[in-house]
Amino acid sequence: MKAYEAVVIGGGPAGLTAALYLVRSGVRALLVEKLSPGGQVLMTEEIENYPGFPKAVKGYELVDKFVEHLANYEIDRMSDEVRSIAARDGGYVIQIGDESVETKAVVLCTGARYRHVGVPGEDAYLGKGVSYCALCDGNFFRGKTVAVIGGGNSALEESLYLARLVDKLYLIHRRDDFRGCKCYQHKCEVNPRITMLRSTVVEEIRGDLFKGVTGVALKNVKTGEKSELPLDGVFVFIGFEPVASFVPQDLERDKAGFVVTDCEMRTNLPGFFAAGDIRSKNCRQVATAVGDGATAATAAYAYLESLHA
Ligand code: NAP
């Protein structure tokens, strides 16, 4: 079985940064990606808020730069699915595809998946009017008409953010009662740019290949009445899920399943660090993922050093 000092799991901005910091510290490290590097950033058409790119940068271009940077250093890489991580002899054994590797430290950077509504058009118009990130994409909809789907704090908060940019916003929720807090709900209700459509579901996101999203097909779940709403964009905020099905049972996670860390990215397990969107935290951005990755690698390095002391 191959042995490493540290294994970074996940090749998004957090994982690529953690890997970069580890190899630069002389740590014998392995980077494991499920498919190709990039993670959720690849889903983002243009990133306007990553410092150093004043004219914005395409998601895939930023990932290419991270990968190019890491290629300056020697690091083993594997592209396969992690199946399990088990504690053994003061370290961990990670099963990756059909292979197992041993390591003293794990840096978990597997991120989160936005929950999808699962209606026709959602995948087809992703990046062409369908978005899961107001902070990233809101600016493209200045002066336009958009819908937000969801009834939790994310949907309410992101609606308030988007309402500062767009001309008109429809907040579409499948029930009458919102799950999110009353204060945000009230702010949405009194906002002149926001119209709440309660007990309403989106049945289809419509558009065409040139214009992208052009509208949605709606259904009132109480009356069964169907209608159409012309739109320029649809933002989906119906929660998200951590990618962590394979982590040890005793790794501390919050109610939603995200991994709890301290500010050094240490988890409750020795030698086990987490960085990026997989962490239990509020701000999920490329900039914060990169910071987490650097912090986790630095803490992992200190941990490895402490083993030799
Ligand atoms: P959430 O609280 O789980 O809410 C998800 C919302 O989406 C719910 O209203 C749910 O409807 C709706 N939904 C789920 N599946 C749907 C579907 N297939 N079609 C249509 N609607 C669907 O998720 P979140 O808003 O992303 O928040 C995640 C966590 O972060 C929560 O704990 C939240 O409180 C927290 N958060 C906190 C803040 C803050 O405190 N400032 C900000 C953002 C998020 P139902 O209500 O009918 O189930």
Image: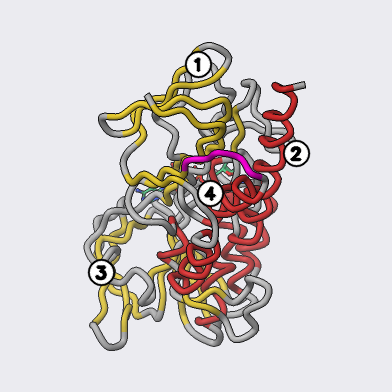
Name the residue located 51 percent from the left edge and 82 percent from the top edge: 140
Residue 15: image tag: 4
Image depth: mark 3 or mark 1 in front: 1
Q: Find disc 1 in the rendering and name its residue.
A: 87
Residue 39 in view (yes/no): yes
**Residue annotated with mark 3:** 124
| Residue 105: in magenta span | no
> Residue at image x 34%, y 29%?
83
| Magenta residues (range) | 26-30
Quadrant hosting residue 274: top right
Q: Secondary structure at mark 1?
A: strand
User: What residue type is disc 1 on?
Assistant: Ala
- Judge whether residue 29 is colored magenta: yes
Q: Nearer the viewer, residue 176 or 267?
A: 267
Q: Compared to 175, does 144 lie above or below?
A: below
Of the 4 image quadrants, the one containing the C terminus is: top right
For the residues labelled 4 and 3, the Cα–Cα distance comes to 28 Å
Callout 4–callout 2 Cβ contact below 8 Å: no
Residue 240 at least partly seen? no
Depth check, mark 3 against mark 2: the one in front is: 2
Label 1 vs label 4: CA separation? 21 Å
